[in-house]
Image (cartoon, grey):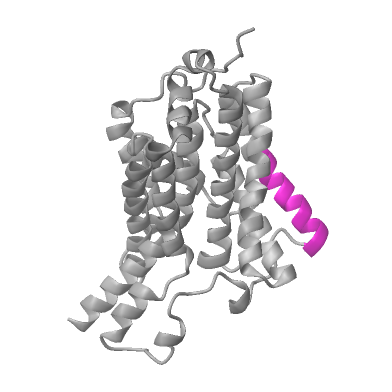
Amino acid sequence: MGSFFSSLGILIYATLLYTPPLLFAALGSCFSENSGVVNIGIEGMMTLGAFVGAATSYAIGSPLLGFLLGGLAGALLGALLALATVSLGADQTIAGTAINFLAPGIALLISKSIFNSSDTPSLSQDKMIPMFFNNAFKNVHSGPGMFFKNLLNVPITSYLVFVVLILVWAIFYKTPYGMHLRACGEHPKACDTLGIDVIKTRYSAVITSGFLSGLGGACVTMSIMNQFRPIAIVGQGFIAIAAVLFGKFRPQGALVACLLFGFCSGLKVVIGQSSVISAQLISMIPYVVTIVILILFVRKSRVPSASGKPYYKSR
């Protein structure tokens, strides 16, 4: 029984650890997708956010500032994507793909220039995102207390992301901006005739998408890992996009999908403690689940009517 609760605690801990990066990015994707802009560049925005967060925290010693600057780095890429797709009418899929190539290149170039390596130096514990209740469980190493330690002693971003989720839900469904945002993704011309600035709304949505994706990337290098590496994100941006498709472009739906993917990553950790199953097969679990979910649910998702279509203001 003790081993069961220990494994359950580890599974819950790993789920709470791996869910926030995906959920931050998925919430960002909800903004851009609902406004009518397809953001394929989530992966690149997470990658640059991951680098900036880790590098800033290492250099300045402030994990909070590193976390926020990681979000701002993603927002800058969001502004670039908005310029290309909203103002210049570029193909949204190609522009997003370009972001996915550009961002890792920028991160590697700066990392090589500053640290003479593709990896940033390892972060000490005080430079990583702080843990909840860390002192309360300092002397707990076994017994029932380990279950509660695994459940509660997680990075603060594990609970902050749920606060952001509630805020995003309120913005989407309880504010005029949220109504305008969703309307721009369905009938931008009708919005224009009603005096809603479609261009401004889409710009704000794509930049917000980049900011939240950058926060998700910073979560990876400042809580799950302790440094930036070129393989830090490894497809998590695309998993976040799949979560949005599964959740039918709604924040609450994305939450369910991200928890599922986070659970699969946690399951990977628990199963990985056994030497019976190949480590390579175990590492495939989140990606196999992503493919299965896309096959089963992608056709059932109703894409906003104007999604992927450039909008030109009436003259």
> Which residue of the protein is positioned furthest toward the right in this rendering?
113
253 drawn magenta: no
- Place residue 10 in its image quadrant: bottom left
Q: Nearer the viewer, residue 134 or 293?
A: 134
Residue 227 seen anywhere in this rendered image of the structure: no
Q: Position of residue 279 (x, y in %)?
A: 40, 62
- Place residue 81 in its image quadrant: top right
Q: Nearer the viewer, residue 160 or 238?
A: 160
Residue at 67% across, 47% down? 104
**What is the count of numbered marks?**
0
Residue at 43% across, 63% down? 158
> Is residue 210 shown above or below 276?
above
Q: Magenta segment, which residues? A: 101-116
> Is residue 46 shown above or below 172?
below
Q: Position of residue 168 (x, y in %)?
A: 44, 45
112 drawn magenta: yes
Q: Report the quarter where the N terminus lies.
A: bottom left
Residue 72 seen anywhere in this rendered image of the structure: yes
